[in-house]
Image: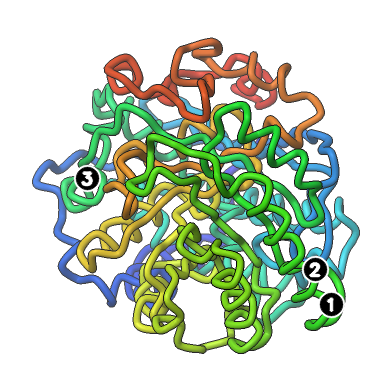
Amino acid sequence: MNHPQHTGQTTNRREFIKNSGALMALGMAGLSMAPDTMVPDPISFAPIRIKRVDSNFEREPLTPYRFKGSAITEAWQSIAFMEADSGISKIGLGTQSVLWSDSRVFAQHSENGGNALMYAMTEHALQLINGQSFTDPVKLLDDILPEVLAYGRAITRTPDLRKTFALNALVAVDNAAWLLYAQQNGIKRFDDMIPAAYRPGLSHRHSKVASIPSFSVGTEVSKLKAAADEGYFIMKLKTGAAGTQQEMLEKDIAFMTALHKAIGHYETPYTKSGKIPYYFDANGRYEKKEALLRFLEQAKKIGAFDQIAVIEEPFAEENETFVGDMGVRIAADESAHTVEDAATRIEQGYSAIAVKAIAKTLSMTMKIAQYAYEKKVPCFCADLTVNPILVDWNKSVAARLAPFPNMDIGLQETNGHQYYKNWNQMVSYHPKAGASWTKTVKGVYPTGPEFYEQSAGILQTSDHYEKLVNRG
């Protein structure tokens, strides 16, 4: 999988990307929406030239995870390798989710076929930067995102392929760039790796982060009660059941009613009300605002309304319905691809953003988190059913976000332990496997001084994944 640097026409394309990428990225990456957050870091480092790249992936089987009217049964773990002229080399990891990032691609191909297309985009990104130089990973992402998206639209034959699909493909590349950048410049802590422009949005230091499990559509309420009995105080509850809109609504209302009856009376020390909060995710299944209002009306009738902390992505991305007048906090997730998209959603009344350093790249996540911070819109971390190492990339963000309203703790969805068949084996690949912050204790991860001092272990190398790439 190691390839020599391309020449000729490809070099011309690279020069074009290098010279015009920043301008193209304004529209694609959303920089134009938040010029005040783009202040350059006062510290200037020498360019890093990439002399060799490689990639690979590992297939991990899942217990079927049902959402968006379908289900995934496997997750590909992508590995991106970069070596600099200095001889320093690093690998970055990504977990692919074709169904989440663009359900149309998932529907039009076999599950493996969709994964192969996303992996091809990761490999394409590596070839774009092979032989090129970068100063910081944020600028690198800005430069290559438009070209990677264009390539993805071509190979998937989807002219309007969602930007999140390209960002998902770029996570491993972006992570490798950050790790290379850190080591090349003697940066030893995650906090010091964050550019000054984005530090305000990641300035908190929670001593605990909620471990939020996720339950797919149709989950038996008894399983939710069992999780609550274990100490999980907030759970991601997939709604948007299969069927017609009427059938969906009836099933969703029945689910909420049974849920509230089973655990609505449970108490928790992590909310101001002392009650368990509800976190619903419809994954864009609701076609009209009226249907969601009926769902909320039923919540009022059964006394569940005040416990709804957030409803994530009830409508499809192209639905521009204003949601700021529904009486509950509506969050944007996959529709907030970039800073620009997040700004649009905020204008449409969305009052929370689910950020995903493990799905939209750390670079893009820092920009979105900073913009939301300036607009006083709370953020929390959602999962992509990622591997244990990426859980800690996400946790590194969740622990530094401002507290979610009515709570005093960081929030992070993490569901890999529920769906990966080989989860315990995957845990052993973590360079800090067994560390205190990697274990859920009564529904939370302890993120004390050790977590911050060791940067959650994410700056260290995983021997398992290192062996899967050609280091030369």
The residue depicted at 62 percent of the width and 50 percent of the height is: 122
The kind of residue on which mark 1 rests is Glu
Q: Amino acid at mark 2?
A: Lys
Residue 134 appears in the picture as rendered: no
Q: In this rendering, does residue 230 appear at all?
A: yes
* N-term mark: 3 or 1: 3
- Residue 251: give its label: 2
Q: Label 3 is placed on what type of residue?
A: Pro
Which residue is located at x 84 percent, y 77 percent? 247
Compared across the picture, whether 461 is left or right of 189 comes to right
The foreground one among 137 and 94 is 94
Question: Which residue, given by chain and number where applicable, does mark 3 sit on?
Answer: 195
Residue 144, percent across and down?
A: 47, 60
User: In the displayed structure, does residue 109 sit left or right of residue 212?
Assistant: right
Q: Quickly name the residue at label 1.
A: 247
Q: CA distance from mark 2 to mark 1?
A: 6 Å
* Local SS, label 3: loop
